């Protein structure tokens, strides 16, 4: 198995690292690791073998050898968010008992990451799961992107919170447009 990093990923990762004044990136990394290990372990248990991990600006792509049944693919798509939710629970409990703000922050980020990944957008695990179930979800993804853009814009304009929801809306909209071009 080999790792591959796109130029877009390196640019986005560098930007996050430069702008991360509160140390959120270090709290997010264990959550990301738990999520991706969930996918990788499920692929392995279903008989697949990972051959490449490609880090892209919009996420991580796992290429594997072997044939998975549709049910196994669905299970592998949902295992990442499931592992992230399990990690969130474990980190929250650990943060409570150890009185650790770092673990509580990591738990919250893992919860957000897992729930976000369950959205019905084509490039997310929720969208992949719906596609495997045979649902056409382009219109739903477009509505989701619109809601994130509207909500993110309102939060950005009327509060002290950053533009995270607004950026998420743009990202979902971009992925939805790319999927529509490909006919997914």
Image (spheres, rainbow, N blue to C red):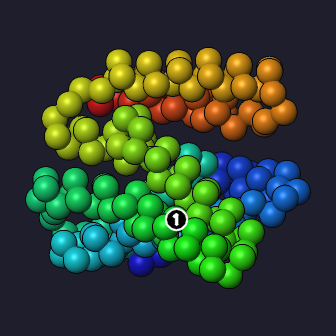
State how many labels appear. Answer: 1
Give the residue at mark 1.
88
In this rendering, position of residue 136 left or right of residue 31: left
Position of residue 52 relative to residue 156, above or below, is below
Mark 1 surroundings within 10 Å by alpha-carbon count, few (fewer than 14), some (14 through 19), many (20 or more): many
Q: Nearer the viewer, residue 3 or 99?
A: 99
**Position of the C terminus by quadrant:** top left
In this rendering, position of residue 163 left or right of residue 75: right
Q: Nearer the viewer, residue 123 or 84?
A: 84
Whether residue 4 is visible here, answered yes or no, is no
**Position of the N terminus by quadrant:** bottom left
In this rendering, position of residue 48 left or right of residue 28: left
Position of residue 57 relative to residue 145, above or below, is below
Whether residue 15 is visible here, answered yes or no, is yes
Picture coordinates of residue 130, whole percent (x, y): 25, 38
Picture coordinates of residue 82, whole percent (x, y): 37, 61
Q: Kindly indicate the quadrant of the structure image that contains residue 127.
A: top left
Q: Kindly indicate the quadrant of the structure image that contains residue 63.
A: bottom left
Q: Residue at x 20, y 43 (%)?
A: 132
Picture coordinates of residue 15, whole percent (x, y): 79, 51
Position of residue 111 relative to residue 141, above or below, is below
Q: Nearer the viewer, residue 133 or 123?
A: 133
Q: Residue at x 47, y 53 (%)?
A: 114
Q: Residue at x 63, y 73 (%)?
A: 96
Picture coordinates of residue 58, whole percent (x, y): 56, 46
Q: Residue furthest bottom?
A: 98
Q: Residue at x 19, y 72 (%)?
A: 46
In this rendering, position of residue 159 left or right of residue 72: right
In terms of secondary structure, where does tag 1 sit?
helix
């Amino acid at each position: 198995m080999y790792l591959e990093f796109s130029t877009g990923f390196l640019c986005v990762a560098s930007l996050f690292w430069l702008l991360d004044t509160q140390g959120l990136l270090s709290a997010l990394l264990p959550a990301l690791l738990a999520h991706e290990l969930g996918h990788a372990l499920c692929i392995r248990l279903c008989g697949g073998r990972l051959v490449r991990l490609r880090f892209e600006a919009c996420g991580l792509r796992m290429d594997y050898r072997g044939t998975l049944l549709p049910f196994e693919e669905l299970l592998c798509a949902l295992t990442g968010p499931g592992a992230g939710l399990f990690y969130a629970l474990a980190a929250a409990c650990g943060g409570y008992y150890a009185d650790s703000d770092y673990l509580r922050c990591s738990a919250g980020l893992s919860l957000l990451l897992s729930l976000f990944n369950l959205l019905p957008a084509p490039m997310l695990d929720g969208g992949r799961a719906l596609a495997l179930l045979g649902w056409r979800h382009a219109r739903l993804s477009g509505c989701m992107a619109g809601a994130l853009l509207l909500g993110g814009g309102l939060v950005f304009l009327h509060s002290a919170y950053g533009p995270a929801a607004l950026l998420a809306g743009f990202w979902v909209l971009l992925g939805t447009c790319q999927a529509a071009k490909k006919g997914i």
